[in-house]
Image (cartoon, grey):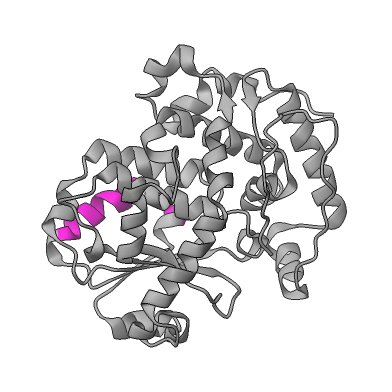
Amino acid sequence: MIFVAAALNLCKAPESYDSYSFDLPDKFKLQAQDELREEDDIRENALKQFREWIAKHPLIKKCRTDAPFLLRFLRTKKFSIPAATEMLEKYLSIRQIYPNWFHKLDVNDPELEAIIDTGYLFALPERDEKGRKIVFSNAGKYDTNRFTAAQLIRVHSMVCEALLDEEESQIAGYVHVIDDSDLSMGFLGIWSFTDIKNLAHCVQNSLPMRQKENHFVNLPSFANKLSDFILSVLSDKLKNRVFVHKSMEELKAKVNPKYLPKEYGGTVPMDECIAQFKAVLKSKREQLVALDEMQIEISKNSAFWANTTDADIAAGVIGSFRKLEVD
């Protein structure tokens, strides 16, 4: 099920909330119970507490409070209210600390649209046998002579945001497949180590996305040091979900090729996969652009925040509201 809103309500304390119905197929309901401890009464109570907490938070000025949005965080954190609220704080904060990464997620932006059209990054139309959404990337398609690292991250942000309200994916998670066969030295040259470190912190601590597997295939030897550095700044949990394959045959032993583009053993041609996903991005454009209006008050500390890690953020001004009372 995909939540689609004509217009987002960003009032942090609306007079009423839209009703919510958990109407996914039974296999997702059972998985939610087994893996996330999700029951109807637990979910209802968690949403109520989460909304009350947002309404009372003195620094949160505008925020989505609809169920699909809040369930991103609750399901990622297995319905731990303290962990979910902390992740929401960080999510709102990094969007403002790094606007060149997380704002203006507009598929009609000529540069972002061009990146999507190349086939650098797109979600595949069919879920795998475990119900997971597969996000496919071809690193060699990224034109580093034309596009920047910031635009690359914005494309990833746009793709992620377009998928995060899918409740099937909130429960079953995501698989990323990255074909590095044509990766160039130029791709490595657009990154700074500071950017990589900051991005790694954002992804693993602020992104409400159940990343189940990350598969890299045909990574060239010149990229080994960079991959080692990236792994060094990831949590052990994420490290254990990263797989590096030396060949397509190794990849296909882990990922059923029938779910991949036709050029990799599936049934749907890559161009068609891209076109279908681009249509999804177009349908969600207004919702994605409206996210820029969400606001948490950090401007008076912007210089401090820009140079901190997530650990520093958790202990900082926003972290001081961790103990806000929730009835």
Q: Is residue 320 left or right of residue 98?
A: right
Tell me which corner region of the image, top left, top right, bottom left or bottom right, holds residue 176. Answer: bottom left
Q: Is residue 168 left or right of residue 128?
A: right
Q: Is residue 33 left or right of residue 113?
A: right
**Image quadrant occupied by the C terminus:** top right
Q: Nearer the viewer, residue 19 or 204?
A: 19
Q: Nearer the viewer, residue 185 or 250?
A: 185
Residue 139 % position (x, y): 26, 63
Q: Nearer the viewer, residue 51 or 287?
A: 287
Q: Determine if residue 120 is in view.
A: no
Residue 275 % position (x, y): 44, 70
**Image quadrant occupied by the N terminus:** bottom right
In this rendering, the answer to whether 283 lies above or below 312 is below
Q: Name the residue: 75% across, 26% down.
A: 55
Magenta span main SS = helix
User: Is residue 37 on the magenta stretch?
Assistant: no
Q: Which residues are magenta?
A: 223-237
Residue 23 % position (x, y): 80, 65
Hey, which residue is sitting farthest top in the picture? 300
Tell me which corner region of the image, top left, top right, bottom left or bottom right, holds residue 201. Answer: top left
In this rendering, the answer to whether 67 lies above or below 31 is above
Residue 196 % position (x, y): 29, 43
Q: Determine if residue 270 is in view.
A: yes
Q: Name the residue: 38% across, 88% down.
A: 265
Q: Name the residue: 49% across, 70% down.
A: 276
